[in-house]
Each structure stands twice: as C-alpha cells, then as structure tokens.
Amino acid sequence: MRERCWRLLFVALLNLLVLEVSTAGVLRYCSAAPQLTATQQDKILQFAAIAREALATSGSRLAIVSRSGLDLSYFNQRYSHAGVSLQNIPGMPWSVRQLYFDCAEQKPRLFDQGLAGFVLGADDPDKGFLSMVFLPTAEANALEEAAQNNAVSLQLLARQYSANAYAFSTLYQNCNQWVAELLAQAWAPQRPSGSDARMHAQSWLATQGYAPTEFTLNWRPMLWATAWSNLVHTDDHPAADLEALTLKVSMPASLEAFIQAKFPGADRVELCRTRTHVVIRRGWRPLPDDCIASDGDQQIAFVP
C-alpha cells in the first residue's frame, strides 16, 4: 500500500509538472480531444474566420501567430504555442507552419495546419486568445523564404522533443524553440547548414539579446518527476538553474519581446473571444483577461 501511494504521488507530481511547463499541449494532443458542442465549434470557427480576415487585410504575407492553449496563468503566461502563418501555402492560405509532437512516432515533426485547426487547439472552448505579429518587409521576406524552404526548416528540427526544452541547448526542442531558431536562420548574416545550424542559431539569438521565459517551480520533487515522462526533461538545463528551480524555456512571450525590441516597426494584433463576442486590438498593449473592449478596440458579436 505504501509503494502504491508513493507511485500515485509521483504520477500527480508529473501531471502537474507537464501541465505547468508544457508549451504545446502535448498531453491533450495525444489523448482524446475535448468534446465541443455544435455551438462552441461554430463560434471557434467564426473566430478563425475573423482572424483570417485580419491576416488577409494586414498587407503582409506572413505573421508569427500564437494561441492560448494550456492554462499557464500561474506563471503569468497567456500564450503557449506559436507558429508562422503563411499566406502562400498552396490550397491552405494562412496555414500555420509549426512543430508538433507525433504521438504515434514519438518524435517532433513539422506540420502545416489550417488556421481553424490552430485555434481549435485551445483548452477552453468558451474563451481564447490569438496574437499576430507582423514584421517589417525585409525581415518578413527573409523569414518567409526560410519558412518555405523545406531543407532549411527541417535542418532546424531536433530529433527529440521536450516541452520544457532549455532554450540554449540542442539536445531537445519545443514548438516555440523551433520558431526562435527559424528567426535566427532567416536574419543572421551567416547561416551554416547541417548539424551546426541549430547551434549557430542559438548563438546568434544569445548575442542579439534573446531572453527565454523563466519558469520558477515551487517544489523540488517536481523536477524529480520528469523521470516518469518522455515529454519533459531536465538534463539539458544548466545545473545552476535546476538548483534555483528555474527553467528557461522559449515561449510566445519570449519571441514577441525579442521581435518588439529588435524591430520597433513591427505591428501586433491581438484577438480574444468569449461566448458572445470577439475583441480585436491593434498595438502592443495586451487585451484584458476578461476580453472586454476599451477605447480603440473593435468588438464583433458572434452570429447566433
């Protein structure tokens, strides 16, 4: 009985750890999808259509998009998963090119997902947020070229996935880290290929002031629990960080802060949805958690 209780404790700790630091909703992706009512699904699809219209009227062919997914409010993180939305993907305009974890193969892959499917990945069926960042023309063109070059995109794909991958190690990778390294591959003056590509991308990010998000854990056994999962790891993190119970992970907030600092001319559009409406805000001031519009915002009621 004592052994069983300890096992249950560690399972609970593991679930807590993965839910708190996962950045792609891997557990949800690998299990049965949450059941949506017809009304909930219709409103999310309306939300996706409104988002697609915002992309189409932006004047850009590309945006870095982030969606809310897992509830990371404990860590003051609204967004969990980012990708690159491309206008010129044949048959699926404004699809999101992203890293995802292939549950069957147990390894990371790259995937083009329609915008509707992307926003359907949120945990809360009645509330969600979506952020779009539009780059200056030269940087957008370079990123578009890199994202649509399969050889370039794939050489940045790690062999092993970790939801809490350390941002400056090539041992693992999470979805947002792949986007960060793609930015480096697009914008760095020198772009080596092959096995050196990821290392060079991370080095360039560090020299340019890229700062990953810091997750501070409150209980050391949460680190021990990683031994029970292939989705989270700690062997890539510096010993000093682990001693301080800190994990430095690439998140959508990290990507957006880096872009805003490096390119003051970058634009941002944020959307949120409730059961009744959508709010659109242009600019870097974040929307409120309750998704209530203020001066300058656009509010659109859902069609019943």
Image: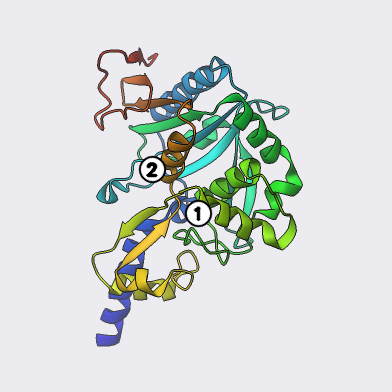
Residue 86 visible? The answer is no
Left or right: where 192 falls relative to 264? right
Q: Position of residue 48 (x, y in %)?
A: 49, 25
Q: Earlier in the sequence, mark 2 or mark 1?
A: 2
Give the vertical position of 155 relative to 119 (above or below).
below
Which quadrant of the structure image shows residue 41? top left
Residue under the image location 32 percent in, 15 percent down: 297
| Residue at x 39% of width, y 41% of height | 79
Give the SS element for disc 1: helix
Which residue in the structure is indicated by mark 1? 206
Q: Nearer the viewer, residue 59 or 118?
A: 59
Q: Which mark is residue 123?
A: 2
On screen, residue 58 versus residue 74, left or right, reads right
- Image height of 4 relative to 47, above or below: below
Residue, x 74% and y 55% (percent of image)? 193
Which corner quadrant of the image does residue 97 belong to?
top right
Q: Position of residue 105 (x, y in %)?
A: 64, 61
Residue 34: in sight, yes or no?
A: yes
**At 53% across and 35% down in the image, what residue appears?**
117
Looking at the rendered structure, the kind of residue marked 2 is Asp
- Viewer-proximal residue among 109 and 132: 132
The answer to whether 3 appears left or right of 177 in the picture is: left
